[in-house]
Image (spheres, rainbow, N blue to C red):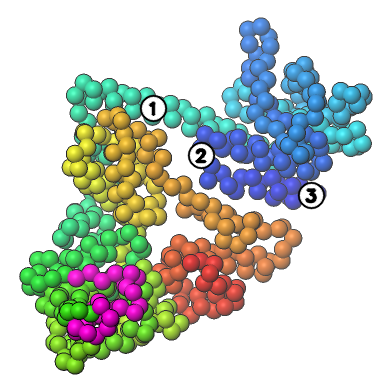
Amino acid sequence: MSDHALELELREGLQGLEEVQLSRRSEFLTASLLGVILEQFNARCVLAYQISPEETDGEQDCQEIASKTVGGQRPPEAINPQMVQRLAELEGPQYTAGDDPAQHGPILSFCFFTAGQQRMLLLVEAHQSSGFDQESADLLATMVNLVEGEIIDSLLISQQAQKIEQLESQIERAEETLADHDIELSILDQQKSDDLPEATRTLKSLGAVSSYDPVMCDVLSHLERLRESDLSVLISGETGTGKSLLARTLHEGTHRQQHRFEVVSCGGLTPSLVEGELFGWRKGAFSGADDDQSGVFERASGGVVFLEEVGDLPLEFQQKLLRVLQEGMLRPVGGSELIPVDVRIVASTCQDLPEMVRSGKFREDLYYRLAGFTLEVPPLRERIVDLPHLIEQFFSDALEQGTPTRKFSRSALAELVAYPWPGNLQQLRNVVSQSVLASEQRIIPRKLVEGYLEKPSGERLHGENVQSTVEELVLKIPATEGFNDIIAEVERLVILTALRRNRGNKSRVTKQLKIPRQTLYNKLDRYGIDESEYK
C-alpha cells in the first residue's frame, strides 16, 4: 500500500471529530488509528499507552489508553508491564521476535512524543507466522508519522477542553455562592460577555415580535406596511419560526381588529368535513346536522382568516376555496343561498408551494391568489444576534409561572447561544422553560441545559460513507474513483443535504446553493434523487 493510500485511510478517522465532544477527541482518533493498524498488519492486538515523565523513583507511568483486538478479546498474557516499560525506553521503531509462542508473538513498537513531556507507545502483536521484521516496524512508524500532528493536536485539545470544563464548573459554583449571598449578576450583564454576540443594532418591534436581525427586521417592516392593506399574504418558513405570531400582527392594531381572527389548521381538517368547517352548514344537510352552523369564513367576516400550513389543504377542496376567495361569497353545505363574506386571507407554509404546483399537488391559481405578497421568515440559526434577547424573553416568561428565582450560568448562556436550534423558537422556548423548572439550584448549570439539547446527528444521506454536521459535510470516496465520479458524488451530497436541511423547499435550496431553479431540477433527475430521501 502506498504512503498516499495509507494516509487517506488513516485520515478517515479524523473526519468525524467535529461530532465528538472536545474532551474525547484524542480517544476517538487513537481508537481509529489502532483499527487501521490492526487491519493493515493483520495483527492479533494493537495497544496504545500514555507514557508520563519519570517519577522520583525513576519509574515511568505507563497507562493503557486504548486497544483493538481481533474479535474484541485480548490474547491471554500477551504483553506484560515489564515489556511495556522496557519498550517505552527505546527510541525509534522496534521489532521484537516472539521466540516463545507461549508468551507472545512477534511485536512491533513505536514510541513518540505527544504533548509536553508525555509520549505515546504503540504495540502491535501478531501471530508467529506473521512474517514481521524490522521493515514492518519502520512501516508502523511511517503510518504513525502521517497523522502524528493530528494526534498531538487532539491530545492538546482534549487537555484544554478538560481544563475549560473544570473552570466552567468553578465559575458556576462561584455564581451559586454569590447568589446565596444575594449578590446579583443580572442576565443582561452576563450576556455582554465577550463570548456572546452583542445586539448592537436597533431593536425592531411589531406586535408580539421583535428582532435585531436585519433580515427579520425587513420582514417586520414589510408587515408594517401591509397591515392596513387587504392584500393576501403568504408567510413561508421552517416549523417553529413564529409564522402564526407574524400572521396576528396583520390583525391586531388594524381596522379589522374589532372582528375575529380565525385560525384554520389545514393539516388537521377532516377531508369529509372540511367544507362544513370552513363554510358552515344548514340543518339537515347531513346526519348529525341538527342546527344551522356558521363556518370559519362567516364567523370571521370583517376580520382575518389564517390558513396555517396551507400546503396540507386537500387538493379536491382547493377549487371551492378559490371560488370563495375570488367571489367573496360562500354557500353553506345543504344551503341554497349565497352569503357575502369580507375576510383578509393570511396563509403560512413550511413546504415549497411552487414545487407542489409544479408536481400537481397544489393549484396554481390558488397559489397566486394566496401569494399576493410573500414573506420568508429566517430560521433561528440565522438570527444569532437575536438569541440573547429571545433567551431573556423566554426566561422572564418562565419565571412568571411561579418558578423560584433562577439564573443561567455564564457557560449555560454560551451553550444556548452556540446551539443551532433545528426546532427554532419553539425549541428554544421549551429548553429555557424546562431548564428553569428542572433546576434545583439558583444558578442553572451548563450540564443541565446540555441535557435538553439534541445533539446534531450524522445524517446518513448516501450510505455509510457520508457524515453531516451543522457546520460541515464529510464524504469518503475511494481514491481509485475517477474524477467525474468523485465530482458527481460531491454534487449529489451537497444537493441532498441542502434539501434535507430545507425540508424539501426547493426555492430555499436554490437560494442557499446560488444556482438556477432549472439547474436544480436537472441535477435531481441526473442523480436520481427521490423525494423519499429528503422528506
Q: Which mark is residue 89?
A: none
Q: Position of residue 77 (x, y in %)?
A: 80, 23
The foreground one among 394 and 322 is: 322
Q: Residue furthest top?
A: 57
The foreground one among 255 and 149 is: 255
Using a 10 Å C-alpha cutoff, classify the residue at mark 1 as few (fewer than 14 neighbours), some (14 to 19) or many (20 or more): some
Query: Which residue is depicted at the point 11% across and 77% down?
Result: 302
Q: Residue furthest bottom?
A: 336
Task: Say which element carries label 1.
Answer: helix
Query: Which residue is depicted at the point 55% across and 35% down?
Result: 24
Q: Earlier in the sequence, mark 3 or mark 1?
A: 3
The residue that disc 2 covers is 21
Q: Position of residue 51 (x, y in %)?
A: 66, 22
Q: Position of residue 471 (x, y in %)?
A: 47, 52
Using a 10 Å C-alpha cutoff, classify the residue at mark 2 as few (fewer than 14 neighbours), some (14 to 19) or many (20 or more): few
Q: Is residue 283 left or right of residue 39?
A: left
Residue 45 lies, with reference to residue 308, above or below; the image says: above
Q: Is residue 311 left or right of residue 89?
A: left
Q: Which mark is residue 2?
A: 3
Please give the range of residues in magenta. Answer: 262-288
Q: Earlier in the sequence, mark 1 or mark 2?
A: 2
Question: What kind of residue is marked 3?
Answer: Ser
What's the CA distance linking mark 3 and mark 2? Answer: 32 Å
Q: Is residue 176 left or right of residue 358?
A: left
The residue that disc 1 covers is 169
Using a 10 Å C-alpha cutoff, classify the residue at mark 3 as few (fewer than 14 neighbours), some (14 to 19) or many (20 or more): few
Query: Which residue is depicted at the point 87% across and 29% down?
Result: 105
Residue 173 lies, with reference to residue 421, above or below; the image says: above
Task: Say which element carries label 3.
Answer: loop
Query: Is residue 221 in view from this perspective?
Result: no
Is 251 a magenta residue? no
Question: What kind of residue is marked 2?
Answer: Gln
